[in-house]
Amino acid sequence: MSLLKNKVAIITGASRGIGRAMALRFAGEGASVAFTDIKRDENMISLESELLAMGVQAKGYESDASSFQHCEATVNEIISDFGQVDALINNAGITRDNLLLRMTEQDWDLVMNINLKSVFNMTKQVVRPMMKARAGSIVNISSVVGVFGNAGQGNYSASKAGIIGFTKSMAKEFGSRNIRCNAIAPGFIATAMTDKLTEETKATFLANIPLNRLGSGDDVANAAVFLSSDLSTYISGQVLSVCGALNT
């Protein structure tokens, strides 16, 4: 398939998990893929090799998405290497869960910087080339807990809610330049983190999901492809929940 043929996509936090699934899915649709992560390790190298083997242009970049200077330098390098940027997927994120009474200032700041400030950092860098091209799609990975909250995740929920507000504002700010901005709010997605959960905890999750299964990285990737492709040219400022009807 070729929904993204001749498009260049930047995906942050892509060496593993949902980000990796998105990188592979985008390449499968013909996109050239530039992806970032905090360090160039075996995960980045293996993904880069896998993408190149699919016959698309691809490169991994070691970059700290929470650093404005890193993002500026990285995007400049990507544009030099790829010549353009058509889609940005802001996926970098972490959790540092705890009840508020036990949460440290460091854990609050770390989650806000990596999850929310990174979205500002990367979006700030890509909007100028997108404005020049008068086209572009920005997809921000939020979460269902950014919509309805979750005890013990005050920092994570706040960061993901902030992403939604930022998404809607950018959709209004850049719509006249034909730049779209949407968010995806995943529910419980099967990742290395959920693999560590007890069967009892997984059963509790499943009891609240009408589709009765955890989501996959591919479920989120499919939504990101749709929002980055020409199938969604009149969709902007929206939050697409990928959650098996958990948020209904």
Image (cartoon, rainbow, N blue to C red):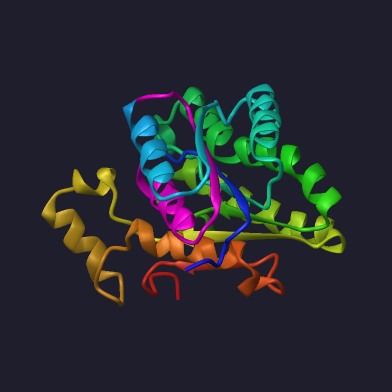
Q: Which residue is drawn at 44% across and 53% down?
A: 22
**From the viewer's perspective, is residue 114 above or below residue 247?**
above
**From the viewer's perspective, is residue 133 above or below residue 178?**
above
Asked if one can make out residue 149 in the rendered structure from this viewpoint, the answer is: no
Furthest-left residue in view? Answer: 199
Q: Does the magenta stretch include residue 42?
A: no
**From the viewer's perspective, is residue 224 above or below residue 166?**
below
Residue 166: x %, y % from top left: 69, 51
Q: Which residue is drawn at 29% across and 69% down?
A: 208
Image position of 127 (left or right of 231): right
**From the viewer's perspective, is residue 104 above or below residue 47?**
above
Residue 201: x %, y % from top left: 19, 54
Rendering quarter of residue 73 = top right
Q: Is 231 in front, or is 142?
A: 231
Q: Is 241 in front, or is 139?
A: 139
Q: Does the magenta stretch include residue 40?
A: yes
Magenta-drawn segment:
16-41
Q: Residue at x 43, y 42 (%)?
A: 52
Q: Is 153 in front, or is 94?
A: 94
Image position of 183 (left or right of 75): left
**In what quadrant of the picture does the C terminus appear?**
bottom left
Residue 127: x %, y % from top left: 77, 45
The count of marks equals 0
Residue 168: x %, y % from top left: 71, 59
Rendering quarter of residue 82 = top right
Q: Which residue is drawn at 60% across and 40% down?
A: 116
Image position of 75 (left or right of 129): left
Asked if one can make out residue 121 in the rendered structure from this viewpoint, the answer is: yes
